[in-house]
């Protein structure tokens, strides 16, 4: 749906395609929108797309999500001056979309606190247990924002609490 501001009056409906869920939509031009799509399941999928709603032409960008990233943030977009920044949960790279191409904008280095590649093969509960509940890892939650020259990311990386009781999670 397209609404005008400041009165929030209905303008028109814009069809962006057949996607499971579209968490982020970003205007590029009257003929072009950049969207993210939430993939079903935990497989790696291409989640960012440039969509022309009139012609129904879609270009899928060559950025693969990670298993379990959909549980955090499946794909968020923010505007930064002359480009758009793309982020998703568990990614160690923030991407940029500029002049119809994609490239890495910045790579996050979590050193020995980063999630190991083999951890992504763990089944759901085992992944949550090892990555979240162990409190041994640092990871990108997928949140991203840019305002007045400042890039804001949300990273999970708490200090391990010796009083944390994995048997009693009722206090969380």
Image (cartoon, helix red, strand yellow):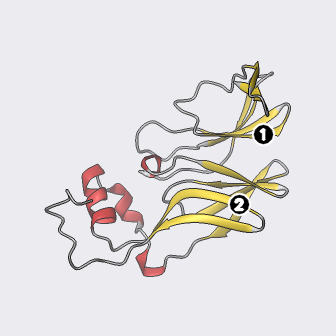
Residue closest to the eye, 168 or 34: 168
Disc on the earlier residue, 2 or 1: 1
Name the side, left or right, on which 54 lies relative to 104: right
Any part of residue 82 in sight = yes
- Quadrant placement of the N terminus: top right
Q: Position of residue 94 (x, y in %)?
A: 64, 62
Farthest residue toward the front? 7
Residue beneath label 1, please? 27
Name the side, left or right, on which 137 lies relative to 80: left
Q: Cα distance, mark 2 to mark 1?
A: 16 Å
Residue 42 in the image: above or below residue 152: above
The residue under the point 66% across, 49% down is 77
Say the numbered circle drawn on residue 85.
none
The residue under the point 41% across, 68% down is 115
- Quadrant placement of the C terminus: bottom left
10 Å crowding of disc 2: few (<14), some (14-19), many (20+): some
The residue under the point 77% across, 68% down is 149
């Amino acid at each position: 749906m397209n609404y005008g501001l400041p009165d929030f009056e209905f303008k028109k409906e814009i069809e962006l395609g057949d996607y499971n869920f579209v968490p982020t939509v970003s205007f590029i031009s009257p003929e072009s929108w950049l969207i993210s799509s939430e993939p079903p399941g935990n497989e790696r999928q291409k989640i960012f797309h440039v969509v022309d709603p009139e012609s129904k032409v879609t270009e899928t960008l060559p950025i693969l999500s990670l298993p379990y990233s959909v549980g955090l943030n499946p794909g968020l977009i923010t505007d930064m001056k002359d480009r758009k920044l793309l982020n998703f949960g568990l990614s160690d790279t923030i991407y940029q979309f500029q002049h119809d191409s994609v490239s890495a904008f910045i790579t996050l280095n979590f050193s020995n606190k980063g999630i190991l590649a083999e951890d992504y093969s763990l089944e759901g509960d085992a992944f949550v247990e090892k990555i979240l509940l162990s409190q041994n890892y640092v990871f990108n939650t997928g949140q991203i924002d840019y305002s007045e020259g400042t890039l804001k990311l949300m990273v999970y990386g708490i200090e391990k609490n010796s009083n944390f009781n994995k048997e009693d999670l009722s206090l969380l």
